[in-house]
Image (cartoon, rainbow, N blue to C red):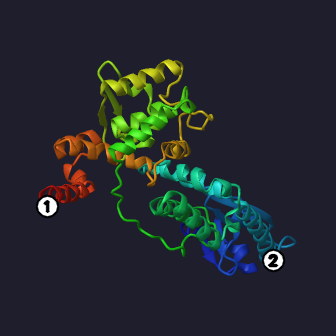
């Protein structure tokens, strides 16, 4: 961008004679590239500097003084240009040095929204979960060693899949700062190993589901969002992020349907979630609890979005109270929902529609493990 703007000026080697003879317009020195000579229609000659500033989206110009006999010479103009440019550079260096991880994240999120990319808040949500204590740190103060240690902790606490997603988001935010915001430091996540995890096949057994329901009915969760939220996940099979941001404008209890708008769905196609009576009752319970709220699950901590954002900590407590011996993620509830439909003999097409998959082949690919389980069970029955 800077080069294309510079071409508008006539480039020449400044000498006293050429400066005196220059035609009206803007002229650039070929020795000190940011030195400019501005000649007005009335012949007034002024030296200045030009610098394109990407994050402002426009050029910065500074006047250095008049050119001509008794005024500023070419050599004086070059010295003054280098000094003034150095001051501008110092100011940018100071700004760059103070750019925090939150600054970079906000700019990256803004860019995603502007470009209409899928799930523009995914990075924001990930950072608030696993890098929250780093948000105020300058980009230059976060090291590769810090990222490696954090990744190991995420993998231990949340699983390798979560660690992989977090690292991808971290890398992307830094890459955007380097490319778009002119941050000149290194990307400390670039050299950290990215381990692609195998697709999860975890589904909760009938016994585990019973344990979870019993835990949700504990007095500890009475009057909180926890009980209706996780029960609705089990009854609808939706992604937990969609339930967090569910709006009453899209829930039609009389018709037994909840519409997830195209811009909010992973597939970018509108989804129609059919609600059974137990699910409708839970929605009605939320309506009574928060009659003035736009959101089905308003934020208990006044989040920026206004709705629930972070249910994973509550889910960890539910798992603990339920006594689940094997780790289970929130997405495992969605997978369990689909597997229960298949186990009940429902068609792949019906399960695809229930999960919001437009192509049943996608559902078949994600639930191929169910066929393996069915084969093993058949062998067991035949030979056992």
Picture quarter with the C terminus: bottom left
Please, is residue 1 above or below residue 103 in the view? Answer: below
| Tally of numbered discs | 2
Q: Quadrant of residue 5?
A: bottom right
- Residue 276, position in %: x, y? 30, 27
Q: Which residue bears the numbered disc 1?
A: 383
Q: Residue at x 53, y 49 (%)?
A: 125
Please, is residue 107 above or below residue 32 in the view? Answer: above
- SS category of the residue bearing label 2: helix
Residue 103 image label: none
Q: Residue at x 81, y 66 (%)?
A: 66
First reached walking from the N terminus: tag 2 or tag 1: 2
Q: Quadrant of residue 345?
A: top left
Q: Residue at x 80, y 66 (%)?
A: 64
Q: Residues within 10 Å of mark 1 (few under 14, many from 20)?
A: few
Q: Residue at x 76, y 79 (%)?
A: 16
Which mark lies nearer to you, 2 or 1?
1
Query: Is 365 on the left-hand or right-hand side of 51?
Result: left
- SS category of the residue bearing label 1: helix
Taking depth in this image into account, of 224 and 324 the one nearest to the observer is 324
Taking depth in this image into account, of 25 and 339 the one nearest to the observer is 339
- Residue 357, position in %: x, y? 26, 46
């Amino acid at each position: 961008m800077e080069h294309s703007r510079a071409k508008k000026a006539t480039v020449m080697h400044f000498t006293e004679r050429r400066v005196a003879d220059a035609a009206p317009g803007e002229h650039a020195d070929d020795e000190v590239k940011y030195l400019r000579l501005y000649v007005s229609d009335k012949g007034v000659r002024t030296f200045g500097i030009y610098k394109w500033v990407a994050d402002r989206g426009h050029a910065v110009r500074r006047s250095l003084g008049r050119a001509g006999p008794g005024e500023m010479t070419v050599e004086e103009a070059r010295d003054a240009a280098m000094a003034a440019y150095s001051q501008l550079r110092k100011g940018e260096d100071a700004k760059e040095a103070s750019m925090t991880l939150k600054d970079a994240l906000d700019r990256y999120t803004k860019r995603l929204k502007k470009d209409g990319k899928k799930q523009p808040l995914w990075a924001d949500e990930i950072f608030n979960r696993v890098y929250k204590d780093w948000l105020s740190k300058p980009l230059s103060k976060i090291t590769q060693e810090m990222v490696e240690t954090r990744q190991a902790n995420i993998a231990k606490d949340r699983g390798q899949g979560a660690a992989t997603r977090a690292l991808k988001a971290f890398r992307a935010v830094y890459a955007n700062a380097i490319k778009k915001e002119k941050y000149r430091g290194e990307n400390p996540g670039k050299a950290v190993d990215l381990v692609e995890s195998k697709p999860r096949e975890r589904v909760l057994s009938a016994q585990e589901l019973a344990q979870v329901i019993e835990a949700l009915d504990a007095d500890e969760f009475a009057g909180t969002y926890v009980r209706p939220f996780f029960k609705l996940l089990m009854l609808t099979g939706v992604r937990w992020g969609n339930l967090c941001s569910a709006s009453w404008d899209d829930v039609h209890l009389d018709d037994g349907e909840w519409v997830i708008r195209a811009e909010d769905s992973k597939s970018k196609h509108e989804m129609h979630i059919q609600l059974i009576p137990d699910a409708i009752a839970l929605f009605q319970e939320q309506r009574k609890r928060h009659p003035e709220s736009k959101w089905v699950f308003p934020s208990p901590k006044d989040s920026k979005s206004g709705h629930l954002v972070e249910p994973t900590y509550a889910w960890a407590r539910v798992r603990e109270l339920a006594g689940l011996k094997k780790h289970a993620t929130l997405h495992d509830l969605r997978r369990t929902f689909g597997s229960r439909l298949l186990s009940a003999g429902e068609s792949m097409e019906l399960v695809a529609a229930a999960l919001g998959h437009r192509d049943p082949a996608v559902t078949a690919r994600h639930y191929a493990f169910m066929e393996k389980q069915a084969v093993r069970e058949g062998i067991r029955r035949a030979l056992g």
